[in-house]
Amino acid sequence: MRILAIDLGKTKSVACIYETETCEAHFQTIRTGIPAMRGLIAACRPSRIVIEMCPPAGWVGDLVLSLGVELQLANTSAPAWRWSNTRRKTDRDDALRLAQLSALNQLPQVPMVERTVRQWRALIRYRHHLVRRRTQIRNHIRALFDREGIALPKARLCWTRAGVAALRAESRSFDSVEQGELWRGELVCELDALEAVERIVDRTERKLDSIEQENAKCRLLRTIPGVGPRLAEIVVAVLGNPQRFPSGKEVGSYAGLTPRQYQSGDSDRQGRISRQGNGLLRAMLVEVSWVSLRYNDWARTIYERARRGSPVRKKIAIVAVARRLLIRCWAMLRDGTAWRSTRLAPIN
């Protein structure tokens, strides 16, 4: 078998042409682009192409599959891909390791996601990036007034129409302010940026809402009390086909919500959660879990059980709720059933 392993980069990529019978490896450097990649595949005629998970992996994978060649997508976060104990790491070393692990059938892999799902995930991340940018602008505006000793309304009152109008009244253009009042010109720029970001957030959320409403799986998850469109869409987009997970433990581990394990001889202890997988999914699950305590009796019971009446275990308990909530979502997607409230034993 001839394996073509490619270490992808932004501008250039290193390809390793590996012969499994003779273990000979030949290297070639090409520009990262569709024409060069297509020419490399046509010249090598490999039986299998191996790439690592990275931003260009999407279009490269689509190209490989369109040519009818077997594709393996390496999971670079797996323990077999760590370089902490090596003295040298180069692009050729990366490509050679890809080829050797693939030849030994020891390559940790992740499934190739369809282009439509990749675009959906990217738009979800973009919306989250916009929300963070909006929060940064709001915090900067508050910092401007704190610096001048002016108190602003708390929480959301400052960002209503009346609140923003009051902020506008305090702003001045740079051309009309003295040097001692430059913060007012800075306030104009920040308010303009806030208005622009909010318009983009509205357009992005309208598109996400239209995609979510057309997806039957998202509508299924929204039957859970406390779960809205933002969590439903990211769960469906990240989990993909629920049948690929054999159990709920695999789902919790995939999202990084299971504890690390340290075992040696008679010692066996568990540490913090692994934090593997999609960080935005974990953050959304924890955020929704806090909200679900108000509306979902099942989540409240799980929380109180994990907390054990101790105020220092609140974060541990909410992570437990997030993990159980994700497993419930996976089970609903797997079976195609709506939410059914489960009666749990009361807390003594």
Image (cartoon, rainbow, N blue to C red):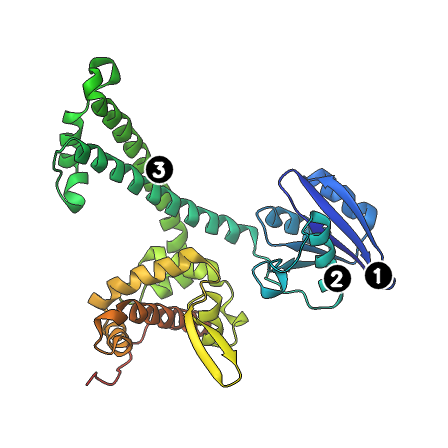
Q: Name the image quarter holding the N terminus.
A: bottom right
Place of residue 282 in the rendered image (x, y in percent of width and height, measured from the top left): 39, 61
Residue visible at 22% across and 17% down? 179
Q: Is residue 281 visible?
A: yes
In the picture of the structure, the residue carrying the numbered disc 3 is: 200
Q: Name the image quarter holding the C terminus.
A: bottom left
Place of residue 98 in the rendered image (x, y in percent of width and height, measured from the top left): 70, 58
Q: Earlier in the sequence, mark 1 or mark 3?
A: 1
The answer to whether 14 is drawn above or below residue 68 in the figure is: above
Element under disc 3: helix
Is residue 203 rendered to the left or right of residue 93? left
Q: Earlier in the sequence, mark 2 or mark 3?
A: 2
Element under disc 1: loop
The answer to whether 296 is drawn above or below residue 3 in the figure is: below
Q: Nearer the viewer, mark 2 or mark 3?
A: 2
Give the residue type that dot 3 points to: Ile
Residue 290: which quarter of the image? Answer: bottom left
Q: Which mark is residue 128?
A: none
Q: Which mark is residue 100?
A: 2
Real-space Cα separation, disc 1 to disc 2, in angstroms: 9 Å
Circle 1: is it few (<14), some (14-19), or many (20+) Cα within 10 Å? few
Real-space Cα separation, disc 2 to disc 3, in angstroms: 46 Å
The answer to whether 48 is drawn above or below residue 144 in the figure is: below
Give the residue type that dot 2 points to: Gln
Give the residue type that dot 1 points to: Cys
Place of residue 85 in the rendered image (x, y in percent of width and height, measured from the top left): 63, 60
Circle 3: is it few (<14), some (14-19), or many (20+) Cα within 10 Å? some
Residue 181: which quarter of the image? Answer: top left
In the picture of the structure, the residue carrying the numbered disc 1 is: 23
